């Protein structure tokens, strides 16, 4: 049961949305979802459009399973800053470094998309694997930043904004 003193301390949802960290949370959620949409939907659609066989497309689709194993390197991400980015702090160093690398990879991916179904898929697949690992690492950093920046009573607002940005980017990316 909640007493009135808890209600007085809780910010309203609209007041919380006006805070810069909330806008940042929605933006981080968007940035987190876009690579996943490219990996799982856009690349698959492009390969199907080229006439690549379903078995190959299915195998390339398994690349997204990297997200299920991000717990393996979560402790490393949580404990250290990215070398060369330590001045930004532990969380921000991972956010900046992984997002910058993802921007470069998305741009490079345009050059490695096979033009025909007989083109080599290996460079394309390697780019998708790299994107998947970096994107999963970015997700870890976003989650850690959310927990660090939002008090427990506001964690729902921060998480919901992240998920909203993520869902919007999935629509845009797909």
Image: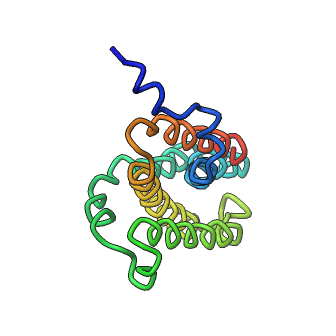
Q: Which residue does the image show at 69% across and 48% down from the upper left? A: 173
Taking depth in this image into account, of 161 and 98 the one nearest to the observer is 161
State whether residue 15 is above or below residue 1: below
Spot occupied by residue 162 in the image (x, y as percentages of width and height): 55, 44
State whether residue 88 is above or below residue 114: below
The quadrant of the rendering that contains the N terminus is top left
Outermost residue on the bottom side: it is 84
Q: Tell me if 105 is positioned left or right of 136 in this view.
A: right
Residue 50 visible to the viewer: yes
The quadrant of the rendering that contains the C terminus is top right
Q: Which residue does the image show at 46% across and 25% down from the upper left? A: 7
Taking depth in this image into account, of 136 and 108 the one nearest to the observer is 136
State whether residue 83 is above or below residue 143: below
Q: Tell me if 63 is positioned left or right of 100 in this view.
A: left
Outermost residue on the top side: it is 1
Please say which color scheme the image uses: rainbow
| Figure disc tally | 0
Residue 37 visible to the viewer: no
Snapshot quadrant of residue 148: bottom left
Taking depth in this image into account, of 155 and 107 the one nearest to the observer is 155
Taking depth in this image into account, of 72 and 56 the one nearest to the observer is 72
Spot occupied by residue 110 in the image (x, y as percentages of width and height): 71, 67
Q: Tell me if 32 is positioned left or right of 66 in this view.
A: right
Spot occupied by residue 163 in the image (x, y as percentages of width and height): 55, 39
Spot occupied by residue 88 in the image (x, y as percentages of width and height): 47, 76
Q: Which residue does the image show at 67% across and 58% down from the upper left? A: 117
């Amino acid at each position: 049961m909640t007493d009135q003193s808890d209600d007085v301390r809780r910010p309203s949802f609209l007041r919380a949305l006006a805070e810069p960290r909330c806008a940042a949370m929605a933006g981080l959620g968007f940035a987190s979802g876009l690579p996943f949409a490219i990996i799982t939907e856009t690349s698959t659609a492009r390969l199907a459009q080229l006439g690549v066989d379903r078995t190959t497309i299915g195998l390339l689709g398994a690349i997204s399973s990297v997200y299920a194993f991000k717990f393996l390197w979560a402790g490393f991400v949580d404990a250290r800053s990215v070398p060369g980015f330590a001045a930004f702090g532990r969380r921000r160093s991972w956010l900046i470094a992984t997002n910058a690398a993802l921007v470069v990879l998305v741009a490079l991916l345009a050059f490695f998309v096979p033009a025909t179904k007989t083109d080599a898929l290996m460079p394309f697949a390697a780019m998708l694997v790299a994107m998947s690992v970096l994107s999963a690492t970015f997700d870890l950093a976003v989650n850690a930043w959310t927990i660090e920046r939002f008090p427990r009573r506001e964690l729902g607002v921060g998480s919901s904004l992240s998920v909203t940005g993520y869902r919007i980017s999935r629509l845009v990316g797909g």
